[in-house]
Image: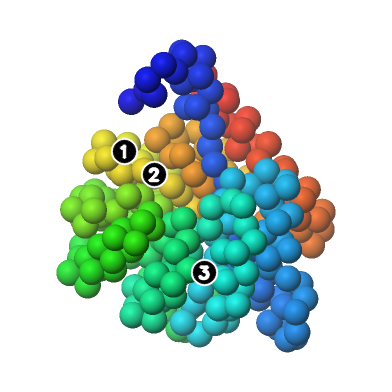
Amino acid sequence: MSIPGETAPARTLRSRTLRLGVNIDHVATIRNARGGRHPDPVRAAHQAASAGANGITAHLREDRRHISDADIARLKSELTLPLNLEMAATEEMLGIALRHTPHASCLVPEKREERTTEGGLDVVRGKDHLRRYVEALKSAGIRVSLFIEPDAAAIDASATLGADIVELHTGAYCERALEGDAAGTARELARIGRGAAAAAAAGLEVHAGHGLTLNTVGAIARIPEIVELNIGHFLIGEAIFIGLDSAIRRMRMLIDEARGARD
């Protein structure tokens, strides 16, 4: 839907723009490996903003393995960019979100033994449990995102729950690409494309993320319904070799090129 009074060139430009959210969790992982204050994830967030990020994502886990409560408080008070708080659907995390009121909260699955988030939320079977969290966050003016697999049932359940956004899990696509499985990569990419189209048709804003690299981001960026990508682990790893500013700028450039190449 166009904005009243918006010119055709402006609408075209807006359609090409793809937001980049930078996840700073693993700056905190490095800090916590030794203790102390360095490296500072909030400093990384400021650098990400300067390098072209459109938002900052931070996952406050129940075990506090990387981001801490103090980090969230500082991010909320210091950032000029939107803060996306990734969180499990628990009473503790709901209380923290309501206290800090980030721009958005992305509900994600969380198991203590996992190294990273493994797959999307089971929104179909967990709909009754999730409903209260979605409603409480929205009532506080926080945009609600659900991290899901790009499947029709999960998308339908997310729309029924009243979520504002779905973030489509790109992990399986990235794994197939890393393995050199061309058929599997194409299959997963098509699945994400279908999911993005279905989610947009259901009135959901569509984001995507997990495992994206310089080699895999282009194909996802070309899916027109996706309006935001959230990328973290790769960027922090790449920063070891070329610096965080350069890593984000290279990712930003590839995203912009991929989105612009569609027209």
Indicate the secondary structure of the residue bearing disc 2. Answer: strand
Under mark 2, the amino acid is Val
Q: Position of residue 146 (x, y in %)?
A: 35, 58
| Mark 3 vs 2: CB contact within 8 A | no
Near-viewer residue (58 or 149)? 58
Q: Residues within 10 Å of mark 2 (few under 14, many from 20)?
A: many
- According to the picture, the residue beneath numbered tag 3 turns out to be 59
Whether tag 3 and tag 1 are in contact, CB under 8 A, the answer is no
Q: CA distance from mark 3 to mark 2?
A: 19 Å
Q: Residue at x 51, y 14 (%)?
A: 9
Residue 206's mark?
A: 2
- Distance from Cα at disc 3 to Cα at disc 1: 25 Å
| Secondary structure type for disc 1 | helix
Labels 1 and 2 touching (C-beta < 8 A):
yes
Of labels 3 and 2, earlier in sequence is 3
The answer to whether residue 60 is left or right of residue 142 is right
Q: Is residue 135 visible?
A: yes
- Residue at 57% across, 71% down: 73
Q: Is residue 164 above or below residue 102?
A: above
Instruction: Tell me, for residue 200, which label it has, or none.
Output: 1
| Residue 230 screen position, x and y as percent | 53, 52
Residue type at the position of mark 3: His
Q: CA distance from mark 1 to mark 2?
A: 6 Å
Residue at left offset 71%, top offset 61%:
44
Q: Quadrant of residue 124?
A: bottom left
N-terminal of the two: label 1 or label 2?
A: 1
Residue kind at label 1, given as amino acid type: Ala
SS class, disc 3: strand
